[in-house]
Amino acid sequence: MSAVIDVAKKKQGFKVPEIRLELPEPMFFIVKFPGRKFSDEELYAIDAANEDLRIEMNAEGDFEIMPPPFPETSRKNWDIDLQLGIWAKKDKTGVCFESSAKFTLPNGAKRMPDAAWILKERYFALPQKEREERFARIAPDFVIELRSKSDRLRNLQKKMKEYAVNGVRLGWLIDPYQKKVHVYRANGGIEILENPQKVSGEDVLPGFELDLTEIW
């Protein structure tokens, strides 16, 4: 696979090196820019010029780059988003986000969970400009990460711990290959459920149960 990070320097008016990586197959990889911090505007330009890649940024400012999901992962993502969305519409206390939303966590990392939910009172307390033109500086109340074929489990586990430390109250790492759900809670607790048919939103999403029948 050939991956290119190119931000159309002339049009954007700033200098960012073009990076080409030749990889044998789609996989997670990291690009470091020592001593370089990117603005939201620059990061948006990089995203726009690389629509075929998912680009997150860790707390150190390194780019964490992933290929787009394969069709089967996309199908499972859609089922998860649908179930969460139906519950949220009935519950009316929060808003849902799918995998293209990027959030700035308190530690500076910019993350794109596969699904997220935020209490309305928290989300709409953000200025409109922040919600419409920035990678909103807010940690979701709830996140889901769905492991895909190209994901390394240890990388996802590290990300889930980061979510919890940065204010996410409940997180699920769903691993369809091992049929496990790793549950991360704000108190630092981690529980691994073996082949569950449903998983509960507990007191963060009261009344919500994700049916995993179509995920396994």
Image (tube, rainbow, N blue to C red):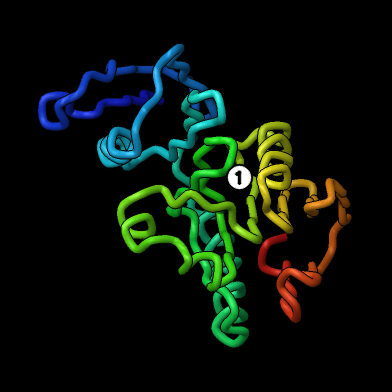
Find residue 59 and report its horizontal and vertical position in percent: 56, 30
Find residue 159 and report its horizontal and vertical position in percent: 66, 39
Mark 1 secondary-structure assignment: loop
Find residue 46 and report its horizontal and vertical position in percent: 30, 34
* In the foreground, 77 or 90: 90
Residue 5 in the image: above or below residue 139: above
Task: Name the amino acid type tagged 1.
Answer: Ser
The structure residue drawn at horizontal position 37% and vertical position 55%, both measured from the top left corner, is 130
Q: Which residue is mark 1?
A: 148
Q: Is residue 19 left or right of residue 63?
A: left
Residue 26 visible (yes or no)? no
Toward the bottom, the furthest residue is 90
Q: Is residue 115 left or right of residue 15?
A: right
Q: Quadrant of the N terminus?
A: top left
The structure residue drawn at horizontal position 79% and vertical position 67%, both measured from the top left corner, is 199
Q: Is residue 21 left or right of residue 108?
A: left
Q: How many marks?
A: 1
